Image (cartoon, rainbow, N blue to C red):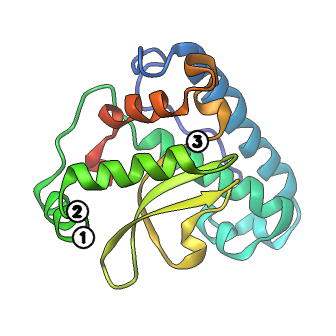
Amino acid sequence: MHFSLPPLGYAADALAPAMSRETIDYHYGKHYKGYIDNLNRLIEGTRFERMSLHDIVLNADGVLYNNAAQALNHQLFFEGMTPVPQPIPAELKSRIERDFGSIDEMRDKFATAATSLFGSGWVWLVEERDGRLAVVSTPNGVNPINDHLNPLMVIDVWEHAYYIDYRNRRADFVKAYWPLIDWNKS
């Protein structure tokens, strides 16, 4: 299977000012594309060549895992944003309130995890095996499906996700990200 960069579901400048066109051009068009290009090169002629991206992430290790997981993480990140603010669907809202107490408490826990993650990585809203929701952080390119968690929402806190627009102000990026979440993709 050959992987390709999926179409961006919005114009490259549609998320501005929260995310500039320049950030999208570099993050989506260079970083994300680079992971896909590397993945295609690494799977060529191997048993992974016929697997889905999800299955590669579950079965690979080393450099292959890193590129596959980063491709999947970026796919979920970019697909999970919209330039048109979305309300949280009633069922998800109810589950968030059940498991966190309130939307504000979940948002605070998510923001704290995103701003306190040391180094590069991802912060996720996930569904655990028992159906409960949790906020988890993963370092580098790790994807929570390897821990049998179902990702519902994710923010990329690698510096390339925000440095053009926010420099070293990760907290400002995290705050600006919240209104971009496409809750209908969660």
- In three-dimensional space, the C-alpha distance between marks 3 and 1, rounded to whole angstroms, equals 24 Å
N-terminal of the pair, mark 2 or mark 3, is 2
Looking at the image, do the residues carrying marks 2 and 1 touch, with CB atoms under 8 Å apart? yes
- Residue 167 quadrant: top right
Where is 82 relative to 37, above or below?
A: above
Where 12 falls versus 31 (above or below)?
above
Q: From mark 2 to mark 1, how far is it between C-alphas?
A: 5 Å
Viewer-side residue, 50 vs 23: 23
Q: Is residue 40 left or right of residue 32?
A: right
Mark carried by residue 96: 2
Q: Say which of 71 and 109 sits in front.
A: 109
As drawn, 149 above or below 12: below
Note whether residue 42 is visible: yes
Residue 143 in the image: state x and y as whole percent: 60, 63
Q: Residue at x 78, y 42 (%)?
A: 37
Find numbered disc 1 in the image and state the secondary structure of the residue it sits on: helix
Q: Check disc 2 and report its element: helix, strand or loop.
A: helix
Q: Residue furthest bottom?
A: 130
How far apart marks 2 and 3 lie (CA) works out to 22 Å
Residue at numbered disc 3 = 157
The amino acid on which the numbered mark 1 sits, given as a three-letter code, is Asp
Which image quarter is the C terminus in?
bottom left
Q: Given the image, on which type of amino acid does mark 3 rest?
A: Val
Q: Could you tell me which residue is drawn at 59 percent across and 66 percent down?
A: 54
In percent of width and height, residue 126 lies at 41, 65
Q: Decide: few, some or many residues near mark 2? Use Cα within 10 Å; few <14, some 14-19, many ≥20.
A: many
List the residue tagged with mark 1. Answer: 99
Residue shown at 76%/57% (left/top)?
66
Among numbered discs 3 and 1, the one appearing first in the sequence: 1
